[in-house]
Image (cartoon, helix red, strand yellow):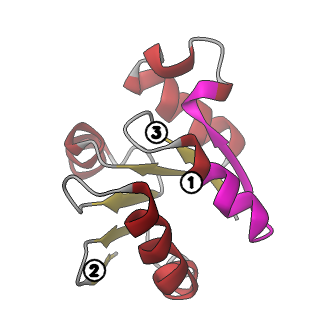
Amino acid sequence: MRFLVDAQLPRRLAACLVEQGHDAIHTLDLPARNATLDAEVIACAVREQRIVVTKDADFVESFLVSGRPPLLWLISTGNIGNRELDSLIHANFAAVARAFTTARFVELSRDVLTVRE
């Protein structure tokens, strides 16, 4: 799987996904780094067929209104420490990966994994 991790999430999340054998980049890897506009993040995700991983509700609105980005993983935990986030991702990643075989939008909170078609 290919991921693009947005600015509100730590770069180490992209590294964690790479460690699990996936292709992942962070907005810090893009030319404008964390100043990359949402439209440019979406364009990159479309061009490179990446799942956008974000905490930003603007991407949810864009997805619901225009279907872009085509694949969206929303992390809806509110403020969360890096260790807790790492633990949450590790505990749920297999289910998230399975969900993306059929779904276009997956939301992970502290307690629930919600799969939306």
Q: Residues within 10 Å of mark 1 (few under 14, many from 20)?
A: many
- Horizontal side, residue 44 vs residue 63: left or right: right
- Disc 3 marks which residue? 6
CA separation in Å, label 1 and label 3: 10 Å
Q: Please, what secondary structure does the residue beneath circle 3 have?
A: loop
* Residue 98, quarter of picture: bottom right
- Horizontal side, residue 101 vs residue 114: left or right: right
Query: Where residue 43 sits in the image (x, y, percent)?
Result: 54, 29
The disc at residue 114 is: 2
Q: Dots 2 and 1: beta carbons under 8 Å?
A: no
Q: Is residue 65 magenta?
A: no
Q: Please, what secondary structure does the residue beneath circle 2 have?
A: strand
Q: Nearer the viewer, residue 30 or 104?
A: 30
Query: Where residue 80 sits in the image (x, y, percent)?
Result: 28, 57
- Disc 1 marks which residue? 13
The quarter in which the N terminus is drawn is bottom right
Q: Earlier in the sequence, mark 2 or mark 3?
A: 3
Q: Is residue 88 visible?
A: yes
Amino acid bearing label 1:
Leu
Query: In percent of the image, x 50 and y 30: which residue is there?
Result: 41
Q: Residues within 10 Å of mark 3 (few under 14, many from 20)?
A: many
Residue 91, relative to residue 14: is it above or below?
below
Q: Please, what secondary structure does the residue beneath circle 1 have?
A: helix
CA separation in Å, label 2 and label 1: 20 Å
Amino acid bearing label 3:
Asp
Residue 106, relative to residue 36: is it above or below?
below
**Stretch of the chain drawn in magenta:** 13-28
- Camera-near label (2 vs 3) is 3
